[in-house]
Image: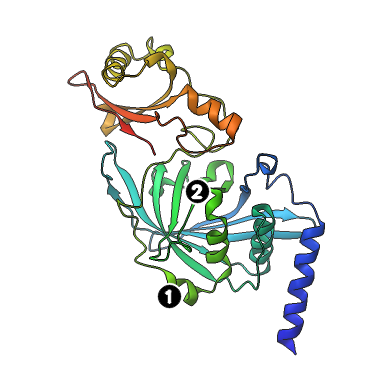
Amino acid sequence: MKRLIAILLGLLTQIGLRAADLPSAVFANLKEDWGDADLKAASVEKKEDGSIIIVTTADYEKETMGFRVVLSPKWETWRPKELSVDLYRGSVWLESIGKPSEIFIQCLARAYKQKIGQINFSSVKLAAISLGGDPRLVRSEPLKLKLFFESEKEEVYAEIFLNLDLPHSIIQFHEKNPDYRKAVLGFLARGKEANQELQSVATASDERVVVTIPAGGQNGVSRNSPKPPLLTDLASKYPQAVKQVSAQLKKEGEEPAEFHATVEEKAGGKFLVFSLVHKDTYVRREKQNLRGNPSGKDRSMEYDLQTNTASQSALYQ
């Protein structure tokens, strides 16, 4: 009898969700047909073992939606094939906080335009790589993660972006690709044991992992963030670096003036990493609602200040 009542209450809740509008403050990109969820950090705690526990929530009418994020205390530096910069690789757990998590999953299903059955979510362990930021410094610096539900079964394999800007209390659960919607809802709705049965070893591999620019540009916390300056506009600040990067782009058959650029120091200022986004990427994102590297020309390049040389490009995919 109790089980029947629970099922009926679940059905009534889903009917209510279909009748109500999703909160625009959470799902701000629905008009662009992206089911991205922007929430707030309700609490942040560092455990004795070094793991970081983040409870993220958002208001939904008179209710609360949300979930718990657990960042592993262990992150290894790792360089994928054909990439000239180091990334961090580790694990992230997404955990239920009860009814708010059920509401979040139901809202996400509506944003994804997907049907969802019974929700048994308790927790799921996901492989993770950092696309920007050091996971160990997440409490003081923004962190952009790409999460993977690894499985030998392609139909349940999934990827998702998790951006954390704890200094500003921003947590973003953003889509990687609409093709993963069913699989993302799958690992959120299944129980812990069911997920474990489907998962392969939760470690991001070279074959699976490619660096993908989150929508909105290389700084990617928001799809509507402004474009970075053109590479040529940075010549006054980095004259030798821009000269060498431009020369390397020309060797690769590209026009330097067509790239927007952001610059990050590495190895204590010995290297400058240029993240280069072609102007066609922004045009195609705006007109065709595409993510990633739709121009096929976005790349990163390292400049060595000691030798005054620029490396070959590492293309984003």
One can see residue 147 in this view: yes
Q: Is residue 216 left or right of residue 90?
A: right
Q: Quadrant of residue 191?
A: bottom right
Q: List x then y, in percent, for residue 57.
A: 64, 55
User: Label for residue 161?
Assistant: 2
Q: Is residue 182 left or right of residue 296?
A: right
Crowding at label 2, few (<14), some or many (≥20) Cα neighbours within 10 Å?
A: many
| Residue type, mark 2 in image | Phe
Q: Quadrant of residue 302?
A: top left
| Residue type, mark 1 in image | Glu
Q: Earlier in the sequence, mark 2 or mark 1?
A: 2
For label 1, the residue is 197
Q: Is residue 272 left or right of residue 317?
A: left
Protein image colouring: rainbow
Q: List x then y, in percent, for residue 65.
A: 68, 59
Quadrant the C terminus occupies = top left
Q: Quadrant of residue 201?
A: bottom left
Are discs 2 and 1 less than 8 Å apart at CB? no
Crowding at label 1, few (<14), some or many (≥20) Cα neighbours within 10 Å?
A: few
Q: List x then y, in percent, for residue 52.
A: 46, 57
Q: Describe the element under mark 2 as helix, strand or loop.
A: strand
Q: Residue at x 59, y 30 (%)?
A: 286
Which numbered mark, 2 or 1, is in the foreground of this view?
Answer: 1
User: Label for residue 236?
Assistant: none
Quadrant the N terminus occupies = bottom right
Q: Is residue 104 left or right of residue 176?
A: right
Q: Residue at x 41, y 42 (%)?
A: 131
Real-space CA distance between mark 2 and mark 1, rounded to the nearest whole angstrom: 23 Å
